[in-house]
Amino acid sequence: MRTRVVIQSRLNSSRLPGKAMMMIGGMPLIELVARRASRGGHEVVVATSREEYDQRITDHLTAQGIPVLRGPLDDVLARFLAATADLDDTDRVVRLTGDNPVVDADLVDELIAAVEASAWSYGRIDLARVPEGLGVEVFTAADLREAAAKATTAYDHEHVTPWIRRHLGELPYAPEDVDFDIVTYRCTVDSLADYVRVAGLFDRHDDAVGVSWRELVAGIAREVEISGPALPRVARDGLTLSRLLLGASPLGRDTGAIERHRPDAAEARSILSAAVARGVTHVVTGRDDGDSEAAVRVAYDPALRQRVGVITTLHALDGVPEDALTYAVEASLERSFAELGRRRADGVLFASPDDALAGDGAAWARLQAFREEGVVGRAGVMLSDPADLGRIADLPGLGLLAVPLSVVDRRAVGFAADLAGLAAAGVVLTVHGVFGQGVLTTTGPLSAEGIGADVAAEAIALRAAVAAAAPVLGRSDPVDLCLAYAAAHPWVTAVTVGVETADQLVRVMEQADAPALSDEEVARLEELIPAAGPALCDRLTRA
């Protein structure tokens, strides 16, 4: 039985054009991938396109004695078929992509052995359990030919193996003797930041071709240990959220109870990159948060868009006539998509219960229609006052709630049983305002003009109480205390936090996995820190 490794590659990558010829380990990336895959003696063919620009790949690899097959740009399945035309039906085909240089012949052989020991003809490295960048697939030439003969969609032809997985079944495989962190052990080359990291990884080794994938992953592990662990994640009925979500409000507006620094585009990009690198799954934006959505779009490295989802809040419907409600919902969401530069949001919230209930349910029904179309993952409501919970708890299709909660805004605690019931029913519950717009965690001057002198005086007193309570409760600072208090409530899925610099974000993330306050500590906190009055609560509900 022969085994042929087919590596797909092209120069017109949308996220990092030309990466196939970028240098890693003293040679172009595509050459490194091919040499590492052929190290054990397997036949290797690089399948590139017939486009003029991919002549660069062909010329270089041919000069290096590496076989090249050229075919249609978008029909990668046809390229694989042509690259394996001389194989017998029972021969093996291994699929690799040209942007994953950590993969080597040893990993390929591990997967082949697992498939041979199973009842399956198709196997793949399971990227739900293994970091991105270690993808390998193996199948027979007969499987490939059947897929080419029967697959009809452009998607199946572009991605080669989906038809095989759907119709012939699969063996998902992960090496059992390696402790992977699938979020932070990222070893593909999909963005410029990826290239810099992976190139540096190979630069530490004299033999870029011979170094094992396990040794390279160990190098990534050492980097991760230095930079800190990834945020924990929680899965809720098909939606996975990191315990911290990045609130984009500080990126898009200057208003607030304290004097705040608004990050420029470069700073915003640094914040997003730091968030994604440490496992933040979602950015939280809003139509009424200034230009936060546009700021997020500008800050995206193209690869980040693939790795972080969006939860956004619709424009408030105050004053919209009933006969225009449906249009207003459509217009707000379409504008969000345009500002964000993407056509899907994992969550969309109405700005208030009144908005969700507007027009005898017409507004809610339109958002549900977007959900059924697949462009909205979950529909929900932003609460400013937890007392409104009863008004919207029975909305059909309710999947997401944003609730205010902080060490001084404890109104949600009175509805803990109701909130726990919703969480048990599958509703994702996020909390905002945990830092009270920074009032509780910074020493910056308060803007009495924006919130009133009386409220400002109350906020200053509460900030002092929070700072004094932190060491009493064994916490390093007010940020640690605020996060530990939110984590003490089991109905909380995720906490939305806003930051102004990447350094702030890293400090917050370092404390995100600290132990929650115990019940006794929560009771002690409530003795040490007075609850905020209604007027101040209204000002402190956004992160």
Image (spheres, rainbow, N blue to C red):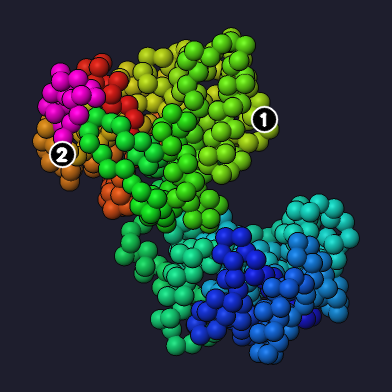
Give the class, few, some or many, for how many residues have Cα within 10 Å of label 1's Cα (few <14, many ≥20): few
Q: Quadrant of the C terminus?
A: top left
Residue 8 visible in the current orientation: yes
Give the x, y percent position of residue 153: 81, 51
Chain-order first, disc 2 or disc 1? 1
Please report contact status of discs 2 and 1: CB closer than 8 Å, yes or no. no
Residue 246 lies left or right of residue 158; in this view the side is left
Q: Nearer the viewer, residue 108 or 538?
A: 538
Q: Nearer the viewer, residue 535 or 88?
A: 535
Residue 427 lies left or right of residue 91; in this view the side is left
Q: Secondary structure at mark 2?
A: loop
Q: Residue at x 43, y 38 (%)?
A: 292
Q: Secondary structure at mark 1?
A: helix
Residue 443, numbered label: 2
Three-letter amino acid code at the position of disc 2: Thr
Q: Quadrant of the N terminus?
A: bottom right
Three-letter amino acid code at the position of disc 1: Glu
Q: Nearer the viewer, residue 200 or 96?
A: 200
Can you say whether 311 is above or below 423 in the image? Answer: below
Magenta span contains residue 525: no
Task: Tell me the CA gap for discs 2 and 1.
Answer: 46 Å
Give the residue number, with chain letter if any, for mark 1. 372
Can you say whether 409 is above or below 278 in the image? Answer: above
Q: Residue at x 43, y 75 (%)?
A: 201
Q: Residue at x 28, y 31 (%)?
A: 256
Give the x, y percent position of residue 260: 26, 39
Residue 515 visible in the current orientation: no
The magenta stretch spans which residues?
Answer: 445-463
Magenta span contains residue 455: yes
Q: Main secondary structure of the magenta part?
A: helix
